[in-house]
Amino acid sequence: MTVLQSLRSAFSTFRAAIHAASAVEMHKIPSARDLGKLGIDRAAFQRIHL
């Protein structure tokens, strides 16, 4: 993996975390793409009481 790919991956993960946190603050379920990028199962996340 090149340095550029590593940076892109890191920023992509950081972006997904920001989007997920924003959705949770609005009492919504984050997108499946963002949860998947963070390694969180969507069904498991839905069982959490926001």
Image (spheres, grey):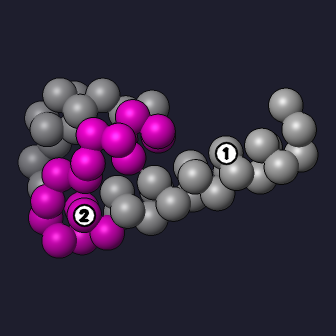
Q: Tell me the kind of residue under disc 2.
A: Ala
* Magenta residue span: 22-38
Kindly identify the residue that appears in the image at 89 percent across and 38 percent down. 2
Q: Amino acid at mark 1?
A: Ser
In the image, taking residue 41 as reference, residue 5 lies left or right, namely right
Extreme residue in the right direction: 3
Q: Main secondary structure of the magenta part?
A: helix
36 drawn magenta? yes
Image point (10%, 48%), residue name: 49
Q: Residue 8: x, y in percent?
A: 70, 51
| Number of the label disc, if any, that sits on residue 34 | none
The label on residue 23 is 2
Is residue 41 a member of the stretch shown in magenta?
Answer: no
User: Is residue 42 shown above or below 49?
Assistant: above
Residue 33, percent from left and from top? 35, 41
Q: Secondary structure at mark 2?
A: helix
Q: CA distance from mark 2 to mark 1?
A: 21 Å
Residue 8 in the image: above or below residue 37? below
Left or right placement of residue 4 versus residue 48 in this view: right
**What SS does tag 1 mark?**
helix
Q: Position of residue 7 (x, y in %)?
A: 77, 52
Mark number, residue 9: 1
